[in-house]
Amino acid sequence: MADKTLRDLLIHTIKDMYFAETAIYKALPKMIDGAKNEDLKTGLTQHRDETKNQITRLEKMFAALDMRPASVPCKGIQGILGEGEEVLKEFGDGEAGDAGVIASCQAVEHYEITRYGTMHAWATELGLDEIAEAIEETLAEEYAADEKLTALAEGGINQQAEQGEGMGGAQRPTGRGGARTGATKGRSTTKSAGSRSTRTTRAKGVAKTASRTKSAASKRATAGKTTRKSSGRK
Ligand code: FE
Ligand code: FE
Ligand code: FE
Ligand code: ZN
């Protein structure tokens, strides 16, 4: 289609996110039910409310473009949510369940961040300031949700996932007990798969990767624009 423009591309992506946010809104109750940690449940419930608001915000973007809301199927989010369900099925009852829920939800947040970050740049380029601002508001919420998940993971859920609760190590395979701390903490995590402390590395990797992605994406999304992001909301 030689006649398709950047504006068309932005509209296509707004439709994609309209589909994605709606799918996320519908999928979140499963994650909330599957989560055991109360703070995690609360955080996800709050983000579900925000997601509802984000759907409304997308509808306002359509209105600003003189369009009715419409969707195009987003295979990306379908895949991510599908994987989340699989992880829940496989790990939900076990000690690593909440770490799995966090990982799945962070994959969702990262998808949203990459899309909204791009959309923000396009809307700004096109001089669609009202839309750019709406995107920025949503983007701030996605970053905040991602950060909160990182804080929960690093604030005890990963560790608990590794140790189990009230098991005293009795049901764990032998030979892993001492390997947890130090070896992987605070280290770059991307290439350590396959090392003997893989289990820990992976769990920590979620959080570390999340933080890194955040700062890089954050810079990109706000580049060249006033940073009125995350106006004190949690
Ligand atoms: Fe969202
Ligand atoms: Fe998509
Ligand atoms: Fe995958
Ligand atoms: Zn989100």
Image (tube, rainbow, N blue to C red):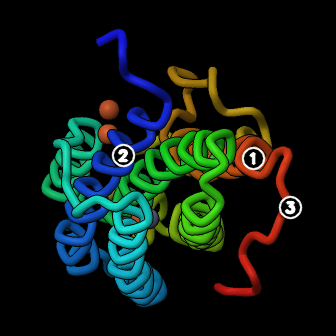
Residue 20: image tag: none
Using a 10 Å C-alpha cutoff, classify the residue at mark 3 as few (fewer than 14 neighbours), some (14 to 19) or many (20 or more): few
Residue placed under numbered mark 3 in the picture: 226
Could you say which is closer to the camera, residue 208 or residue 53?
Answer: 53
The kind of residue tagged 1 is Lys
On the image, the x and y values in percent for residue 160 come to 49, 69
- For marks 2 and 3 on the same chain, the one whose residue lies earlier in the sequence: 2
Q: Is residue 13 visible?
A: yes
Residue 173: image tag: 2
On the image, the x and y values in percent for residue 56 come to 35, 77
On the image, the x and y values in percent for residue 89 come to 13, 56
Q: Secondary structure at mark 2?
A: loop
- For marks 1 and 3 on the same chain, the one whose residue lies earlier in the sequence: 1
Residue placed under numbered mark 1 in the picture: 185
Q: Nearer the viewer, mark 2 or mark 1?
A: 1
Q: Do the residues under discs 2 and 1 have CB atoms within 8 angstroms?
A: no
- For marks 2 and 1 on the same chain, the one whose residue lies earlier in the sequence: 2
The kind of residue tagged 3 is Thr
